[in-house]
Amino acid sequence: MVHRLPLRLSSLTSLAILFAALPVAAQGDPSSGQTPEPKALDWKDLTKSGIPIRFYGFFRLDAYYNSARMDSVVLPTRVLPETKRNDDQFHLDPRLTRFGFDLTPVPTAAGTVTGKLETDFANFPTGSSESRATPRIRLAYIDVAKDELGLRVGQDWDVVSPLMPAVNGEMLMWNAGNTGDRRAQIQGRYTPKDGAFDVKLALGLTGAVNNQDLDTPTGERDGFDSGMPHVQLRVGFKSDGWVEKRKIELGVWGLYGRTETDTFFNGENRFDTWLVGVDVSIPLSESLTFRGEAWAGENLGDVRGGIGQTINTTAGTPNFGGEIASKGGFAELVYMLSPQTRLHVGASTDDPDNDDLAPGNPMRNLAGYAGWWHDFSTGIRTGFDVIYWQTDYLASVGAGHGGNAVRYDLYFQYNF
């Protein structure tokens, strides 16, 4: 004990000497007895570049109930064939919770530069814990704009099929009438100053969405194996309608690419993928809007068409080794009851060509839906959607068979 006390006193003395050596500005003026105001933080203290950022996002919980079995209770694309009655499903899910930020635009000699990162937790990996969702990238890009031109590189929404249905926030009615998704791309755009039209052109990554590899486990993913990006183009138009200050918007678009397999199917291993379509948004009154899309194409699994089907790999069927064609779209009415309350009703369909399918393949998705959401003054949004969903499958003989379900989604969302 007699040896420890001097050591402790020595340590305290050393600390006192170090503190006394600090700049006076950090300690304050001892003679005044006042401590100066702390230095205000600026963006250089928070980001390495000093560029300001803007955070946004929301917290969300969805409660799902399906009256019959679907291929996923959280991320559904079709109703499974009914093998027993009352095979219902229920799920509580927070995975749509979202976080993102935008970089404040910075003027440079090359143009105005900005960037975005947006994430959520809805990748739903196989075998993952329900309460341990893994974050996924939704958007991540750099954007450069100068005058009427723009360039965007990174992950962004497809140029084609720009509209999204008002329901099914987790899957946006993909493979059931709505096409387009997010992927890595190089995107250029032209928007004249009068804003009467705009053009977007992109080179995108094929295989980014469906990750298809028909040669698993020995092959490369089929989109990557093509050795080329796919091309997307959209031309949009705006014109005055009969509702003051609200524009009629119309877009025409197309996509062309290719997938390739190591295995030959009926002598073929290169398969075209293409999509053409239109989108429209028409204000019918100050509160009511009609909007929708229509499309057709082949080998559309990677752009959320054809009920996820790409080529026919079943030997002995009429289109063995051929691309699966499909057509579809969605249409809806959106009514703004007030700035805080919105109602919506609509329908969607994805209808592959039966001649391209093998027995047991899904041959049509059909859905009708209605719902509403309301924003409270607290910043909380509550919504409720109901979807009647029917999936038909190609039978070996005669008419198809399938299943139907009613899907309910009650959600709570707090925006920030």
Image (cartoon, rainbow, N blue to C red):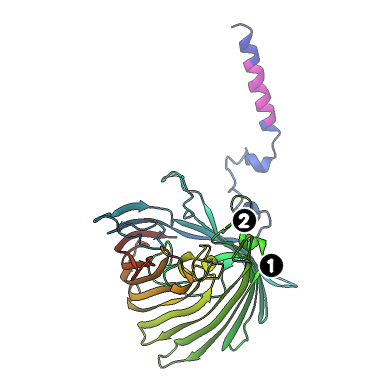
* Residue under numbered circle 2: 42
Q: Considering depth in this image, is 12 or 115 the residue closer to the camera?
A: 115
Name the amino acid type tagged 1: Met
Q: Which residues are magenta?
A: 8-18
Q: In this rendering, is residue 276 above or below 396?
A: below
Residue drawn at (39%, 67%), measured in percent from left and top?
Answer: 394
Secondary structure of the residue carrying numbered label 2:
loop
Q: Quadrant of the N terminus?
A: top right
Q: Earlier in the sequence, mark 1 or mark 2?
A: 2
Image coords of residue 311 (percent x, y): 54, 66
Residue 284: % across, % down: 37, 87
In terms of depth relative to the viewer, which is nearer, 208 or 242? Answer: 208
Vertical placement of residue 135 versus 341, above or below: above
Kind of residue at disc 2: Asp
Relative depth, front residue between 200 and 118: 200
- Using the image, determine if residue 95 lies above or below residue 237: above
The residue positioned 63% from the left and 66% from the top of the image is 267
Give percent across and percent down for residue 379: 37, 62
Instruction: Say which mark, if any, is on residue 228.
Output: 1
Q: Secondary structure at mark 1?
A: loop
